[in-house]
Amino acid sequence: QVQLVQSGAEVKKPGASVKVSCKASGYTFTSYYMHWVRQAPGQGLEWMGIINPSGGSTSYAQKFQGRVTMTRDTSTSTVYMELSSLRSEDTAVYYCARDNGIAAAGTTPYWYFDLWGRGTLVTVSS
Amino acid sequence: QSALTQPASVSGSPGQSITISCTGTSSDVGGYNYVSWYQQHPGKAPKLMIYEVSNRPSGVSNRFSGSKSGNTASLTISGLQAEDEADYYCSSYTSSSTYVVFGGGTKLTVL
């Protein structure tokens, strides 16, 4: 079964860091780019960044540069998103979402998301 | 304020057709065919409905269609059904350092 399974909800204090995981199954993990998208309560979607699970290269939205780190573990087919210096405005549901583009040398993402995880709620509160 | 502009809400009766617009610039919607649409029911993850402006993924009803003219993309839902009631988001690749921009979302109400 093709799916993305994310880690459970987190509660963090301002200034702390959070690391969310997303485990892929049912397809070749290294063949497809992976994105992270977040959604604050009652708000719209916001793109955070993308990782190539094959080589590990990343690109981040300028808004999150310096605060976000995306990594992957090919042995467990898992991608991670770590966000540091958390503030209350970072309270949101964080989704991993697969890009339909093949992550091979010389290719580019397709920039649409065909498979989503269920989301991980991160609450930042003192 | 979202980078792409969508109406906050639209409504229609069962069986009718509705269209949701998504307006951007020549740096995103108008410059690339990387426009996609997502349906999101309350408490659920978004679901891909349209990709690359007008393509439908396998399993998505042919009542859903997409198009683009200039800097504005559109999602049309024909033969409205109760289960279509949801939030809809457009998305586009952008040449800016943001890479991907979303619309603010449109709440569809089936009367």
Image: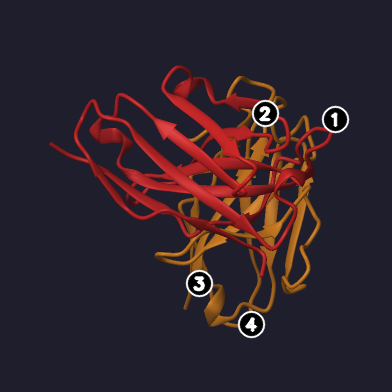
State the image coordinates of residue B61 (x, y, percent, origin top left).
73, 74
Name which of mark 4 and mark 3 comes first in the sequence: 4
Left or right relative to A121: residue A66: right
- For image coordinates 23% across by 25% down, the residue present is A15
Q: Which of A27 and A43 is in front in this view?
A: A27
Q: Nearer the viewer, residue B106 or B99?
A: B99
Earlier sequence position, callout 4 versus callout 2: 4
Instruction: Say which residue appears at 35% left-offset and 45% top-offset.
Output: A92
Percent across and percent down for residue B9 are 47, 58
Q: What residue type is labelled 4?
A: Gly
What kind of element bears circle 2? loop
Secondary-structure class at tag 1? loop
Assess disc 2: are there few (<14), some (14-19) or many (≥20) residues with their C-alpha within 10 Å of its C-alpha: many
Of badges 4 and 3, nearer the viewer stands 3
| Residue A87 appears left or right of A51 | left
Disc 4 crowd rating (10 Å Cα; few below 14, some 14-19, many 20+) is few
Same chain under badges 4 and 1? The reply is no
Give me the residue at 24% from left, 34% from top. Answer: A88
In the shown orientation, is residue B37 left or right of residue B11?
A: right
Name the front one of labels 4 and 1: 1
Where residue A17 sits, quadrant-wise, is top left
